[in-house]
Image (spheres, rainbow, N blue to C red):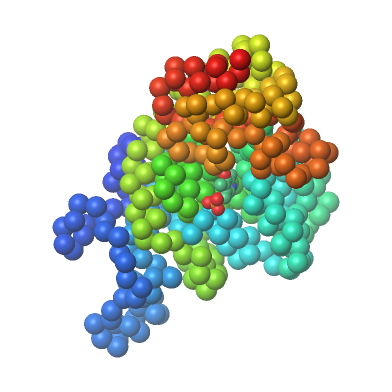
């Protein structure tokens, strides 16, 4: 495989990677609002269709504004690695996950995964894919012996599907160890890297075959568009069977959203540095607060996955959760008192977002189910923004009174 040969720094690739000079000398790649592309001759049309000549044909298949975002993210996911990868931008993170699972798995195949997958992924894996004969085996994959036992006992498992760190308790799994196991049992490995971003963690470096992002989050960075990307290191497969599935099922990204995404990624490094520095201060503040029973943040040595996270991530990231001592009502009261911080689900925006799973995302989930995911009544999930840390802390402090 080809090396990502750039000798440039991470920030330079984030800013310039994927950019091609524009025919009209526009500084930024324009938003190509065109549904179809023109052939100079019948022969050229033929050559584009057969792939003999590169070029755009129809915007469901590809678009120059979209290509720039795809190439930029693929370069960042392979930064410094001896491999090449191809990204396909989708209309949403869920669309990218759907393409991955439906284009690589067939009836009778299984995936091996863990608890506390993203809600949409959980729904897809447990309620939609079973109708097509694709099912999931769920285990605690932090226990490597258990993971091997599951892989060994069920040879219809064709893919390990990982999310690390995972919502809402920031559980992490050992990417290198699980990829090595998967290889032994001839399994593909996919990792949802949304929480970490390629700046903090590179699943491909540990042996993963696919990386997925909801680009809606940190990559876009400003909460201005929904999007998702599927990146694969088997470039041929990405161009053929997976690309064909994508082109046919039509979950393509809009060029406007791709444009916003490209501009967002350019500042990913500086944003992440600030998100992470803020999160560290806020975790320390919450950790010593009398109203807080527990803080889940992998940057704290008290987190059960602190060691794994430190091994495979540049920094613990900007997501944390904490448990209030006063249960459901305590959580509701706290949320209502927030003034600077925003009450909203999602993550990766410039502003700090907090949600209370027990009264919001998981309100209708039975208690035993919730506990399996580590969701207690007083649990608050927090995405730490890039505001001034002292202001975030002051807001939390007054809301905790
Ligand atoms: C948001 C999210 C998704 C889904 O992405 P959409 O862009 O909302 O479709 C998948 N995985 C994780 C970890 C997410 O946070």
Instruction: List x then y, in percent, for residue 59.
Output: 39, 70
Is residue 113 or residue 226 the one in the foreground?
226
In the rendered view, would you say 258 is above or below 32? above
Count numbered badges in the picture. 0
Q: Quadrant of residue 320 in the image? A: top right
Name the residue rendered at 74%, 38% in the picture.
Answer: 373
Residue 338 location (% of width, % of height): 54, 26
Which residue occupies 36% across, 73% down?
A: 35
Query: Does residue 101 show up?
Result: yes
What residue is drawn where x is 45% and y is 38%? 349
Looking at the image, residue 217 sits to the left or right of residue 126; the answer is: left
Looking at the rendered image, the quarter that the N terminus falls into is bottom left
- Give coordinates of residue 342: x percent, y percent: 51, 33
| Position of the C terminus by quadrant | top right
Q: Is residue 34 left or right of residue 228?
A: left
- Residue 235 visible somewhere in the drawing: no
In this rendering, is residue 226 above or below 247?
above
Residue at the outermost bottom position: 42
| Rendering quarter of residue 379 | top right
Relative to residue 216, is residue 348 depicted above or below?
above
User: What is the x, y in percent for residue 49?
Assistant: 39, 80
> Residue at coordinates 48% horizontally, 59% vertically from top-left?
91
Q: Quadrant of residue 47?
A: bottom left
Query: Which of 144 and 396 lies nearest the eye of the viewer?
Result: 396
Q: Using the image as rendered, state which of residue 337 and residue 95 is in the foreground.
A: 337
């Amino acid at each position: 495989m080809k090396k990502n040969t750039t000798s440039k720094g991470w920030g330079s690739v984030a800013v310039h990677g994927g950019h091609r000079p524009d025919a009209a000398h526009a500084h930024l790649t324009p938003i190509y609002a065109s549904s179809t592309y023109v052939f100079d001759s019948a022969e050229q049309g033929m050559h584009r269709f057969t792939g003999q000549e590169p070029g755009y044909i129809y915007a469901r298949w590809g678009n120059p504004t979209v290509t720039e975002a795809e190439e930029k993210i693929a370069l960042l996911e392979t930064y410094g690695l001896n491999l090449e990868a191809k990204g396909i931008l989708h209309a949403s993170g869920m669309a990218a996950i759907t393409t991955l699972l439906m284009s690589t798995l067939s009836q009778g195949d299984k995936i091996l995964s863990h608890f506390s997958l993203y809600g949409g992924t959980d729904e897809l894996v447990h309620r939609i894919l079973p109708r097509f004969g694709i099912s999931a085996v769920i285990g605690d994959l932090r226990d490597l012996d258990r993971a091997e036992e599951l892989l060994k006992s069920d040879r219809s498992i064709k893919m390990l599907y990982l999310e690390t760190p995972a919502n809402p308790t920031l559980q992490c799994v050992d990417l290198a160890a699980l990829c090595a196991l998967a290889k032994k049992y001839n399994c593909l490995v996919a990792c949802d890297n949304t929480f970490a971003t390629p700046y903090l963690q590179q699943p491909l470096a540990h042996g993963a075959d696919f990386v997925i992002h909801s680009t809606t989050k940190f990559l876009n960075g400003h909460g201005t568009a929904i999007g998702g990307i599927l990146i694969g290191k088997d470039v041929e497969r990405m161009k053929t069977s997976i690309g064909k599935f994508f082109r046919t099922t039509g979950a393509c990204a809009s060029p406007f959203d791709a444009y916003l995404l490209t501009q967002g990624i350019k500042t990913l490094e500086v944003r992440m540095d600030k998100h992470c520095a803020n999160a560290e201060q806020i975790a320390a503040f919450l950790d010593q607060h009398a109203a807080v029973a527990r803080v889940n943040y992998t940057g704290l040595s008290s987190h059960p996955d602190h060691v794994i996270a430190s091994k495979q991530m540049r920094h613990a990231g900007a997501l944390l959760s904490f448990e209030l001592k006063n249960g459901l009502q305590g959580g509701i009261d706290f949320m209502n008192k927030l003034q600077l911080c925003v009450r909203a689900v999602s993550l990766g925006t410039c502003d700090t977002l907090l949600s209370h799973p027990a009264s919001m995302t998981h309100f209708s989930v039975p208690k035993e189910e919730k506990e399996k995911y580590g969701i207690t009544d007083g649990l608050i999930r927090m995405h730490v923004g890039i505001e001034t840390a002292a202001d975030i802390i002051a807001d939390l402090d007054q809301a905790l009174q």
